[in-house]
Image: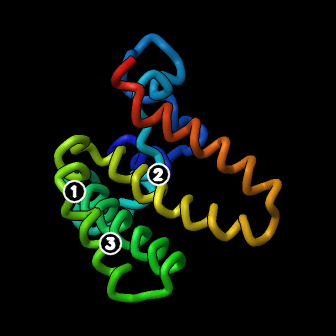
Amino acid sequence: MNWNIHQLFLNPSDLFNANIYYPYKNSLAFSETFLTSSVLSIIPMWLLKEPIVAVNFTLISSIFMVGFFTFILAFYLTKNFWPSLISGLLIIFSPLFLDKKPTSKCYLFSGFLCQSCFLLCLSNLLNPVIFYFQCYFFFFSFIIVFFRDIF
């Protein structure tokens, strides 16, 4: 993530020409880019000038995002504040969430997963054809991301 933040300001067109796997061009494509995490942690990294700040900020903010978007989704579905708040807190502190995948990438994906569920519910009201296409895409992307370690 430090390379991404560094290269976004110096030369964004050479973002994927990282300093790993030297003889090859666009070598950042061979590993995980963490581009979204890098964009989220630009300001804390700029303020404190420490590379570990980017990782810690991404981890903490993604856990918060999971709870917040779970609250938003539950509030949209139930229209009750307290059960929605409890569902957001339960998913943050559940052992299945904190114990199984302790990487910032999975936490960040989980936050976007809850946000996608909320937007999926909204798209059902607007256009049912788009809703079924999104359900199909959402289901298979969920299967690929969460079960890729098994295969």
- Quarter assignment of residue 89: bottom left
Tell me the amino acid under the disc marked 1.
Asn
Q: What kind of element bears circle 2?
A: helix
Residue drawn at x 71%, y 65% is: 123
Residue receiving disc 1: 56
Q: Are the residues tagged 3 and 1 within 8 Å (C-beta)? A: no
Q: Which mark is residue 7?
A: none
Task: Report the quarter where the C terminus lies.
Answer: top left
Total marks placed: 3
Residue at (47% x, 61% y) in the render: 114
Q: Are marks 3 and 2 in contact (CB under 8 Å)?
A: no
Labels 3 and 1: the sequence-earlier one: 1
Residue labelled with disc 3: 87
Q: SS at mark 1?
A: helix
**Position of 13 relative to 147 (above/below):** below
Mark on residue 36? Answer: 2
Q: Residues within 10 Å of mark 1 (few under 14, many from 20)?
A: some
Q: Position of residue 135 (x, y in %)?
A: 65, 49
Q: Mark 3 to mark 1: distance in Å?
A: 24 Å
